Image (cartoon, grey):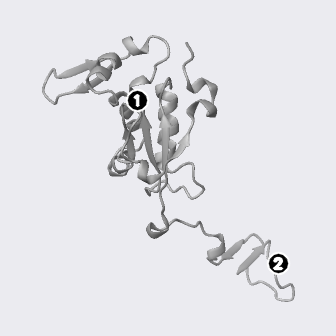
Amino acid sequence: MLLLLINGHNSINHSVQPKYNNLTIYVIISINPAFMTKFVKKDEINSEWFEIDATGAVVGRLATVVSKIIRGKNKTTYTPHMDHGDFVVIKNVDQIKFTGDKFQNKKYYRHTGYPGGIKEITPEKLSEKKPGEVLKLAVKRMLPSGALGKKQLTKLKIYSGEDHPHTAQNPKIIEIGKLNQKNIVRN
């Protein structure tokens, strides 16, 4: 239902004289479900599995693609406050690349919680200790902080070699180099 009174004239029915002065504007709009935003319910969510080969992939560009899939931004039913993203399996993570000198010069900082407890580490040393941690940190920082971000980060599965235990899910293969030629380092 929509009723407009503009400058004292009833726009729907001209035979009725309004009781209001000439400058009054009244708008009455009913709530129609056809015009409301549709949200996805938990039982309507179905997650897919994707597989990405990270051989020669640039860390930041790979992380942006992965974070969009994990959050569900690649779907038309994206809702910011719900977790309806897809699972991503990344293999050959030990062969990812940084552009420029970032592999030796970039620094990751963390704090132990004690006074003077700031620690720093380069991606080179971090990838020697934990090969997938560099990519995991990049994706984690692109997700929302809080409980929703932690839950979405569990959908990221990182493996150093070709083999992974998720072949039963029949993941769809995403070739990162075909999305954009800058996604792969060509040396």
Q: Residue at x 54, y 19 (%)?
A: 185
What residue is shown at x 43% (from left), y 37% (from top)? 90
* Residue at (46, 47) in percent of width and height: 70
Q: Are marks 2 and 1 in contact (CB under 8 Å)?
A: no
Residue 33 position in % (x across, y down): 62, 76
Nearest the camera: 175 or 30? Answer: 175
Q: Position of residue 158 (x, y in %)?
A: 37, 37
* Upstream in sequence: badge 2 or badge 1: 2
Given residues 144 and 89, the one toward you in this image is 89
**What residue is shown with label 1?**
93
Q: Give residue 163's quadrant in the image.
A: top left
Residue 21: in sight, yes or no? Answer: no
Gap between marks 2 and 1 measured at Cα: 66 Å
Residue 67, given in percent of the width and then of the height, sits at 47, 41
Q: Which mark is residue 11?
A: 2
User: Helix or strand or loop: what does disc 1 sit on?
Assistant: helix
Residue 155's place in the image compared with 161, above or below, is below
**Amino acid at the residue labelled 1:** Val
